[in-house]
Image (tube, helix red, strand yellow):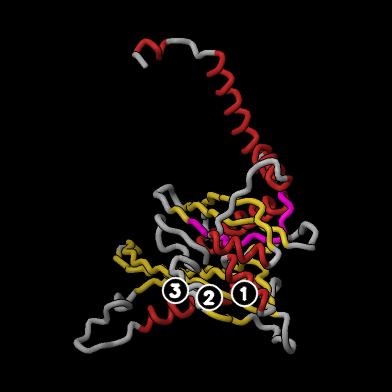
Amino acid sequence: MSIFDRFKSPSPEQKAAAEESWRRQSDILISLRGGRIPTAALHRLEETAAGTKPWTATLTPAELSITRSHGLKPIATISATCWLHYGFSWTRGHAEGWGQALFRLAQEAKACGANAVLDVKMRTIRLPMGESMDFTLVGTAVKIQGLPPSSDPIIATVPALEFVKLLEADVVPTGIAIGAHYEWLRDWSGYAANPNVWFNMEARQLSDLWEQVRRNAHQDLRQNARAKGNGVLAHVNFSQMFEVEREVEEYKVKEYLARHIVVATTVDARRGTALPHEVRMAVDMRDQTPFTGKLPHHQSYATNEESGAI
């Protein structure tokens, strides 16, 4: 392209492409504000479900084979994103961000007639754009043989192979639960992290702060999970603590921010005697899973370069 091409009027094809792009972007914004799936995405999902477009899946060939032998048919790879500004609360921000992404993922699953979404991966992007973060979910929508399309599809972070193994054990993944909490500690004495003694000594103030934040986050998780099942599987813990020095009434005071988030797949165990009402942490699979041994699964928040199921 020469420098003179910049001064030429756009061709009819370029004008048509620009108008189509503007219409598509306007439809996306209007649809999201109205809580609907954008028209282009809805048509793609409907055509994929009808078999007029090729289907895609995040599953491996081995997982595709075993799911088909157990009556599961992949329909489409679906995704949902919410970029949320935290406002006044990091705690509510994480709950609302993932909640909105889950709502949109469920909408896509219903649009293509799915019974469940498997192998759901969490992807997070933290950029220096104020107090905000991207919350993205990607998974494979599947139909279970013999069941009609669901009005409330199961959304499970477990991969397809683990989903089948859980069903064989009469344990049904039912959804995703979120718990998050943060608190500030103002250290007027200046000795919270460094008591300035020559022997080993616990930083009791920070220990208490950390314990309180973690307990509250797990309590939020239990509360969020209680309506979805009687157990919690594959929970992931993400923690941060920051030290900040502020000017308070002409004094330099250190403050500590501790925050913790825990995300899990909820399950409902069908077999055996009645289970207690209290939601229990069934197994922590954030490092490795006894079903597949794949490290990337059951992790989130660790990096932006790799992502896996929780």
Q: Nearer the viewer, residue 84 or 230?
A: 230
Q: Amino acid at mark 3?
A: Asp
Q: Are the two marked residues, 3 and 1, in contact with CB atoms closer than 8 angstroms?
A: no
Report the residue at 70% width, 41% height from top.
Answer: 52
Q: Is 117 included in the stretch rendered in magenta?
A: yes
- In the rendered structure, find residue 165 and report the number of the disc placed on it: 1
Q: What residue does disc 3 label?
A: 287
- Distance in Å between CA atoms under marks 2 and 3: 12 Å
**Cβ atoms at labels 1 and 2 below 8 Å apart:** yes
Residue at the image point whose x is 72% and y is 44% from the top: 46
Q: Which residue is mark 2?
A: 291
- Sequence-wise first label, 1 or 2: 1
Give the percent coordinates (x, y) of residue 145: 75, 62
Give the residue drawn at x 37%, y 84%. Answer: 204
Q: Which residues are magenta?
A: 112-123
- Residue 263 x/y as whole percent: 54, 68
State which tag comes first along the sequence, 3 or 1.
1
Nearer-the-camera pick, 106 or 166: 166
Is residue 116 at all visible to an observer of this figure?
yes
Task: Name the amino acid type tagged 1.
Answer: Lys
